[in-house]
Image (cartoon, rainbow, N blue to C red):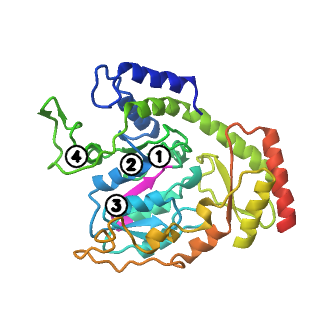
Amino acid sequence: MLGDEERTAVLEVLESRSLFRYYGPRLLGKVAQFEEELARNIGTEHAVATSSGTAALRCCLAALGIGCGDEVIVPAFTFIATVNAVVTAGAVPVFAEIDETLGLDPQDVAAKASARTAAIVVVHLENVPCDLGPLVAIADQLRVPLIEDAAQAMGTSYRGRKVGSIGVAGAFSLQLEKNVTSGEGGALVTSDERLYLRAARYQDQGGQFVTSHMGERGRELDDPFVGENLRMGELAGAIAGVQLGKLPGLLERLRSSRQRLAQAIGPVEGMTERRVPDPDGEGGSSISWFLPNPRIAREFSRALRAEGVPCAQMYGGKPVYANPAVLERRTASQKGGPWHCAEHPTTVEYRMGLCPVTEELVGRSLTVPVGPSWTQLDCDQAAEAVHKVAGALL
């Protein structure tokens, strides 16, 4: 929720005439302050603010040195950005099944691992942390890093630890719909100093400003490397800093709204609620169910919307590899890249039916988003609509 505090913070930056994070006539250091506060909030040693959540994932992969010849295991159900980050890093995404948590199935992760597996990316969808315990154990057994794509879950926790602090690094999004927003933006968090320094360098054109000042080089971690411009500006940093301070209150309101809605609906025959690994740590922004079959799920969604209740099947009820660009393994150049690399040929191909458990689960899934300002009346009316539709379809 945006208000006077964000407006004031933005005006301060405009009046300073210092919109670039590394210098200006009166630099306020809003991005640096946000990084410090975020690291403290999540419980990591470091944070690197970026231009988007996708950029944060790119920095994670680059900091780990992942690229050509590598495979990265990702969930078959996620936003396309998870896959895009892997492909643009030059690595091949390998899709693993999800389970009733809508997070990675540890057993299938182990089955999909190969000698080329360089990392595992877990995704905390819709403010619900994955069941990280078994996934961390698998990553440790395979001796590969586990990256947390926590774009949709800032501030949530798993067994008392904030998401983003459990894997080797975590990535957050600050896009408009996220818990903390600056319109666009992102951040990487880690307690590994080497990864932090490499990520900071990568998002700054290989370290044009973070490793130099007034012609004097800063401390070098290792040999310089080419990077990208994935930096966050001071205006976004100012908004993000204010938003971060509002995060605990936002999550408290979301959790209260979700609890009221769940209690008002109660158990409904024919609707199986998504399994939440740590109910105390979830963010409370939605409730998801699995219906008996995809046809009923689609009809249920349409009927609920007709009753005035927001409802949808996440990502159209399809796996991420259903995206035509992924199915056909197409990059912008349509040559080279991870799928057509002569030096590192791959046998990985994609097709519908690749992850049948995932396709079956998401095809009959249904999600109702919950707002932080929902009243008891809002929850009661939504619950009444759910029961009305369930009575007609189930």
Closer mark to the observer between disc 2 and disc 3: 3
Residue at image point 78% right, 50% down: 308
Mark 2 touching mark 3, by CB under 8 A? no
Q: CA distance from mark 4 to mark 2?
A: 15 Å
Is tag 2's residue or tag 3's residue first in the polypeptide sequence?
A: 2
Which quarter shows the N terminus?
Answer: top right
Q: Secondary structure at mark 2?
A: helix
On the image, the x and y values in percent for residue 40 come to 42, 34
The mark found on residue 206 in the picture is 4
Front position in the image: 109 or 182: 182
The residue that disc 2 covers is: 56
Front position in the image: 103 or 227: 227
The residue that disc 1 covers is: 173
Residue at image point 57% right, 31% down: 2
Membership of 147 in magenta stretch? yes
Q: Which residues make up the magenta segment?
A: 140-151
Amino acid beneath label 2: Ala
Amino acid beneath label 3: Thr
Q: CA distance from mark 2 to mark 1?
A: 8 Å
Q: CA distance from mark 1 to mark 3?
A: 18 Å
The residue that disc 3 covers is: 88
Front position in the image: 167 or 74: 74
Q: Secondary structure at mark 1?
A: strand
